[in-house]
Amino acid sequence: MTSRRELLNHAATALGAAALPSHAAQKWDAGAVTHLLPTVSHNRILLKASFNNPLPTPPKLKAGARLYDGQRTDTRGQFWLFDAPGLEPSRPYELHLTTAGKRLCDPWTLKTFPAPSEQPKALRLLIYSCAGGHDVLKQPDGRSWFLPSAVRARLLERGLSFAPDALIANGDHVYWDLLAPRASLNLGASPEGIAYAGRFDRSQPVMGTPNETVFHRAAGPQILPLYGTRCRSTPVFFLQDDHDHFDNDEADDRMVTFPPDHFMLQLARATQRLYYPEFLPDAGRPMGLPYSSAADRPAGVSESFGTLRYGQLAEILLFEIRRTQTLAGPNAVFVAPVVEDWLKARMAAPGVAHVVNVPSNPPGWSAGKWGEWYADLLEPGGKLGVSKPKPYWQPGWRTQHDRLLQAASAMRSRIPLFISGDLHSLAEERIFRTGQIDLRANPVVAVLPGPLGTSDMGWPSAFRGVKAMPPAGLDVEQGLAPIEENGFTLADFTPESVVLRFFRWNQKQPVTAIDTLEPFRVTTLQRPG
């Protein structure tokens, strides 16, 4: 039996051995393929793909000895999905894409996850947020509003060089805000954005109308150059947040942008359908959660609430807050009550060593935004506070936040870990109290994993006038105060612990420094008891 010391030594060796510039990797011929983004469970693969040109005949995916027909997801036949059920757990599958008997790219390998009953010894996740950004959108001085896609791709390649078992991209894959009174002026409603992509007609469907061309121009360049085929052998889990619905969370007397209207939902659903996979079914997740089991999606998948289940080692609960948030005052919620019930049930259930919450909106920090768990606003002196009411903020959001943190802390044999998106920072803290709820018996650990695409005005300190900071009503200990730099986090799970490795890159550094990034902070979290 492998000892804990041997496992940790193996993880450290693998971290160093895998940390080689991916440019040295063996060449792989992408052929006609523009992008490949797969996800897996223990018995199924779901793959989203696009090609240089429309395919006149439907493509096929071969996994092992079985063939699976491609399903067209756009009007022209350039985007396709492949759904491959009935696979074996923990098995590497050689995958082939063909059309009319002709190969579309080189074969590649993708491995299914362990079965829920298996006991794997290790899991490595690559986690980041805010990877979107369009190179065409420029500031008045000519600089991009976002980190150029080539630099983002280099950061992604560095993360992938450590050979993660899966990747979690937490929210904001697309920045093309259309109506938000402030953010849209530099994005989808800007003169540059309109000149490049055109205007949406909100009275028409997104797909199958002139809107489809605008959509491809707005969304495609934010996703395709970044991912390409880099993740073909790495299962991906994409959460959506506010900008993925083509607007910023803003609220004033002119407009309240969320919950999303019908056209925002169409845009978000179209982006997911074409570019990145939904969440595959899981036995512990109800099939009837909101935005699950839709008739126009592969059987049983969920669009907003997902599970990354890795045998009995880890269950990662992924949930976005925008689609089901309500404006009901003290009864308002970010996630629908049935979703909250699912989260709390999984945290209370035995049988898995680690249960981790990955929401699109972070507990533990505030930047004075409207659509946060917290009532904090920017006050004179550059600090956050609650001396004035936050317009249109709903107290029920904070109440739900407290219930979720209490449920996490109640996992006495687990680390109550939250790894979140949205706030464009690298950070780590422990939460000892929220409101009147004492969490000291098992403090909640909150992490911001780092943004991939943020630049200049995207940092909270620039756009909002304040860095992310702990809000009122929390007792916290900040192990790592928020850092506004690009980066990502590796999370290594063993049955006894979670090791978090934080990576950062400052835009004043040369781009070549990305290729040799090493962790600047390592945190080891031991399971209680």
Image (tube, grey):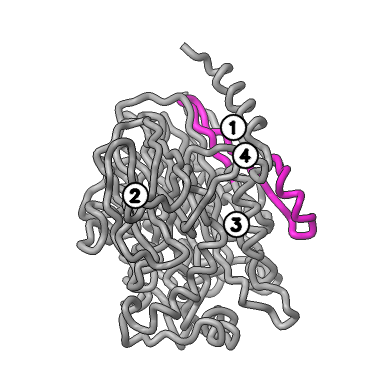
Tell me which residue sits at (66%, 65%) in the image. 148
The reply to whether callout 3 and callout 2 are in contact (CB within 8 Å) is: no
Secondary structure, mark 1, is strand
Three-letter code, disc 2 = Leu
User: Is residue 325 visible to the viewer in this orientation of the structure?
Assistant: no
Three-letter code, disc 1 = Thr
Which residues make up the magenta segment?
489-518
User: Is residue 337 visible to the viewer in this orientation of the structure?
Assistant: yes
Say which residue label 4 marks: 501
Nearer to us of marks 3 and 2 is 2
- Tell which residue pokes out farthest to the top in this image: 1
Q: Earlier in the sequence, mark 4 or mark 1?
A: 4
Three-letter code, disc 4 = Arg
Q: Earlier in the sequence, mark 2 or mark 1?
A: 2
Q: Earlier in the sequence, mark 3 or mark 2?
A: 2
The residue closer to the viewer here, 178 or 523, is 178
Residue 332 quadrant: bottom left
**For this view, does 51 lie left or right of residue 485?**
left
